[in-house]
Each structure stands twice: as C-alpha cells, then as structure tokens.
Image (spheres, grey):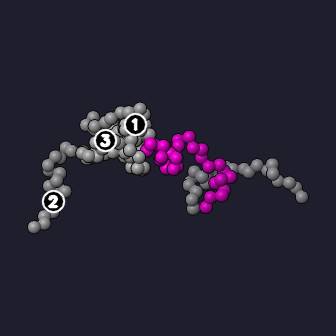
Amino acid sequence: MISTFSLQATQLNDPTEKILLPPTDPNAEVMEISGYKLVYVNGACPKNYRVYKADSMIGVVFQHITHWSNAVDQIRYAEPVDAAVGLDEFMTMTGYFTTATEQPFTEEELLDKEFDALTFEDWERLKRYVPAAKHLVAA
C-alpha cells in the first residue's frame, strides 16, 4: 500500500525545526574558518555545509569521512578551509561573482546598449550627458 504524507503531518513532528538557518541564527551549527563561515545544512556522510564569505553565500562544501569537497570541482581537500577557498576561487575566476568595486557603465558604454536594456537611472544619466568634442574635426 502506498501512502502519502502531508506537509502538515510532517511539520507536526517538530514544528520549531527551521530549515536553512542563516549563520547569524543562534540555533545554527556554524564553523568559522579563516574568512568563511560554514553552516551545517543536513546529511551524515557527507555532511552538507553552506559557505558564507562576509554576508553572502558562495556555495556548498561537503564533509566526508576522509576528506572535504566542494560543489564545483572533483578535488579532495584535507581541510574545510581548503574546500571553501577552492570554491571561492572557482566562483571568482569564472566571473560568477561581481565585485562591489565594479565600476558602473560609462555614458559611452550606455550608448552602445540596447534601449530596452537601459534602466531608469541609465536614462537619467544619458539625459545629462554631453559628449566630448575633442575628436571632431571641422571639414
């Protein structure tokens, strides 16, 4: 006989259980390592941890019995910090993350974008833009 469990019945087992606790939650199992916070999610072997750098989640690492691994490569790491750094470097190298220091588009670059891709702020900047005439030559 096949039976289905309702979500309500599942929640009755432990109504105070929280899923995906943030690293700031006092009930979260947090491992702090050299610039990263690993927050336990679930699992026994491997244990799954979300990796935070500053206040942003960058990915997932796994604790196996003999080693650590991350969600982006096939490398076995001896320490959790190595798995987190490997994850961070991979995500940065592939351009997945944009840095906070990234400069906004210049007005010249905005002029090369499609009209539909421009935001309200982009249009406001373009309204005030006066192109430099240093390359223009009178004929």
When the figure is inspected, residue 62 is found, relative to residue 114, above or below; the finding is above
Q: Which of the 4 image quarters holds residue 78? A: top left
State the extent of the magenta-drawn residues as a range.
Answer: 86-115
Locate residue 10 relative to residue 19 in the image: left or right: left
Horizontal and vertical percent for residue 107? 66, 50
**Label 3: which residue?**
66
Q: Residues within 10 Å of mark 3 (few under 14, many from 20)?
A: few
When the figure is inspected, residue 57 is found, relative to residue 122, above or below; the finding is above
Locate residue 60 relative to residue 125 in the image: left or right: left
Q: Residue at x 69, y 50 (%)?
A: 129
Is residue 56 found inside the magenta-colored segment of the image? no
Looking at the picture, tell me which residue is in the foreground, 18 or 110: 18
Q: Residue at x 17, y 59 (%)?
A: 6
Q: CA distance from mark 2 to mark 3?
A: 36 Å
Q: Residues within 10 Å of mark 2 (few under 14, many from 20)?
A: few
Let me know if residue 72 appears in the view: yes
